[in-house]
Image (tube, rainbow, N blue to C red):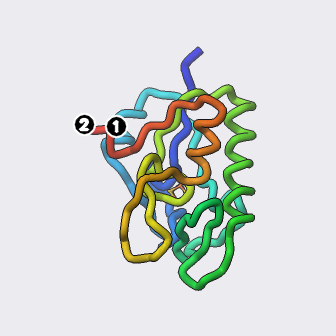
Amino acid sequence: MKEKILVSACLLGENCNYRGDSNYDEAVISYLKDKDIVAVCPEVLGGLSTPRAPSERIGNKIINNLGEDVTKEFYAGANAVIKIVKEQNIKKAILKDCSPSCGLDEIYDGTFQHKVIRGDGILVEMLKNIGVEVINCKKITN
Ligand code: SF4
């Protein structure tokens, strides 16, 4: 059986990011061409609208740039993805960089000043906790 790879839906061209746009990534799409993929957007799965106000992680909270606490929605979406990952026995994920959900190793610092700090998005943290290998989309090159 082919291994299944979890992927951020926005990288495949789905218009699900906060701007109502995609983060279409040709290198990722080409890498995944012959692979079995499961595309998800945790923020949409958590019930957030598209477009939506941009959000950043501050500790274990997620706050949007209107000052609203959207932690509950972010965790609901990440939990929905974790359920899919467990049901489908997924062991690898390729996710969008710097997102408060999907970012690996680098996220924005919560000031909305485009300042990047070390840290993981909510979903990435949960995937790591159950032993899923997470790859930053920027590491995939043609
Ligand atoms: S939550 Fe993840 S999949 Fe959804 S738009 Fe943000 S980076 Fe893309």
What's the amino acid at mark 2? Asn
How many residues crowd around disc 1 within 10 Å: few (fewer than 14), some, or many (20 or more)?
some
Q: In the image, what residue occupies the spot 75% across and 31% down?
A: 87
Quarter of the figure with the N terminus: top right
> Which amino acid type is marked by label 1?
Ser
Dot 1 or dot 2, earlier in sequence: 1
Residue receiving disc 1: 30
Q: Residue furthest left?
A: 142
Place of residue 44 in the rendered image (x, y in percent of width and height, measured from the top left) = 64, 61
Q: Secondary structure at mark 2?
A: loop
In the rendered structure, find residue 61 and report the number of the disc placed on it: none
Q: Is residue 140 left or right of residue 93?
A: left
The local secondary structure at tag 1 comes to helix
Q: Nearer the viewer, residue 51 or 136?
A: 136
Residue at point 60%, 29% (across, down): 131
Q: Is residue 5 above or below residue 57?
A: above
Mark 2 = which residue? 142
Q: Is residue 122 left or right of residue 93?
A: right
How many neighbours does mark 2 have within 10 angstroms: few (below 14), some (14-19), or many (20 or more)? few
Above or below 98: residue 139: above
The residues bearing labels 1 and 2 have C-alpha atoms spaced at a distance of 8 Å
As drawn, which residue projects farthest toward the top?
1
Q: Nearer the viewer, residue 81 or 129?
A: 129
Give the residue at x 44% y 76%. Answer: 112
Question: Toward the viewer: 30 or 3?
Answer: 3
* Disc 1 to disc 2: CB gap under 8 Å: yes
Relative vertical location of residue 20 with respect to residue 78 in this rendering, above or below: below
How many numbered circles are shown?
Answer: 2
